[in-house]
Image (cartoon, rainbow, N blue to C red):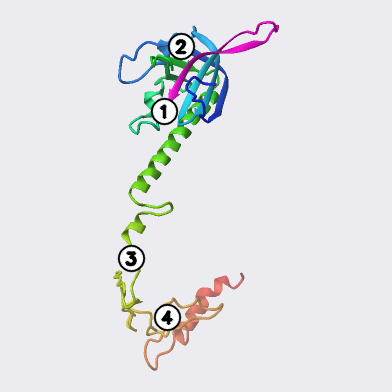
Amino acid sequence: MSAFEGPSTHTLSLLSISEVFVYSIPKLQTSSGHRAESWGLESPALTGHMKVLEVGPKLIVQLFSTKPKEGVSGATDDVLFAEAPIDLKSNPASIMESFSVPVIDSSRYFAIRCEDPKTGRHVWLGVGFRDRSDATDYKSVLQDYKRGVEREREAEARKTAGIGEGEGVGDLLGDMSLKEGEKICIKIGGVEGGRRKKKNAEGGEGGGINKTGGFGLLRPPPKAGEIVGAKVGEGEKEKGEGEGGEEDDEDWGDFEGF
């Protein structure tokens, strides 16, 4: 139970870490942030455990020490050492860094703002974790709480602006669909009137038949043993016939053995 709990406050346990080191830390001297190396890490003020609770609109980080349990050998009792309330909901201007902040020289150490619920006095303490996974779990709980508060603020802002759940900016702009008889004209380079410009038979624009009777494609390769002649004029022999034919046979004679 937390001293920050009211008689009818809903409490939910979010995290329990079995080992945590607590340090008395100096006041922050620079705006760059806290440095764990200046805390005397070899000599913590307390080695205990931590619990994080959700108490109404707040997160409560609790630090516990232990003492031997009277009458039971080897048993211990938890003793509350300090509590650090984190409240981002009561004041919209509140930020997480006002309550818990990571150090600048390690991912396993944090400075947290602890408060006495009776007097309201507060002090910053350093906390550290032996396992990096424990530090990650602690950081994740704080991030989840922060995101939850941000979602609530966004929902409240949408409600104030008159935007219902599931609505967006488009709902505020009204119906932007085309009415009957309305058209949209789009001009794209090389396209006119919704169709591409046709090439003429001379090889201009369009996809018509060219002079050779094809559709702009290359001729297929000649079949084996076929010689494609080229017409050089009416009444002339095709290449490879007549006198030129004997020379061709001589040229290819060396390859007849293959």
Labels 4 and 2: the sequence-earlier one: 2
Residue density around tag 4, few if under 14, some if 14–19, many if 20 or more, within 10 Å = few
Q: Nearer the viewer, residue 28 or 223?
A: 28
Foreground pick, 142 / 92: 92
> Which quadrant of the figure has residue 256?
bottom right
The disc, 2 or 1, on the residue closer to the chain's N-terminal end is 2
Of labels 3 and 2, the one closer to you? 3
Asked if 34 appears above or below 170 in the picture, the reply is: above
- Comparing 25 with 239, the one in front is 25
Residue corresponding to mark 1: 87
Closer to us: 240 or 44: 44
Whole-percent x, y for residue 198 in the image: 34, 80
Name the residue that disc number 4 marks.
215
Classify mark 4: helix, strand or loop: loop
The residue carrying mark 2 is 23
Q: Which residue is mark 3?
A: 176
Question: Compared to 6, does 126 lie above or below?
Answer: above
Helix, strand or loop status at disc 2: strand
* Residue range of the region highlighted in magenta in the rendering: 65-86
Of labels 1 and 4, earlier in sequence is 1
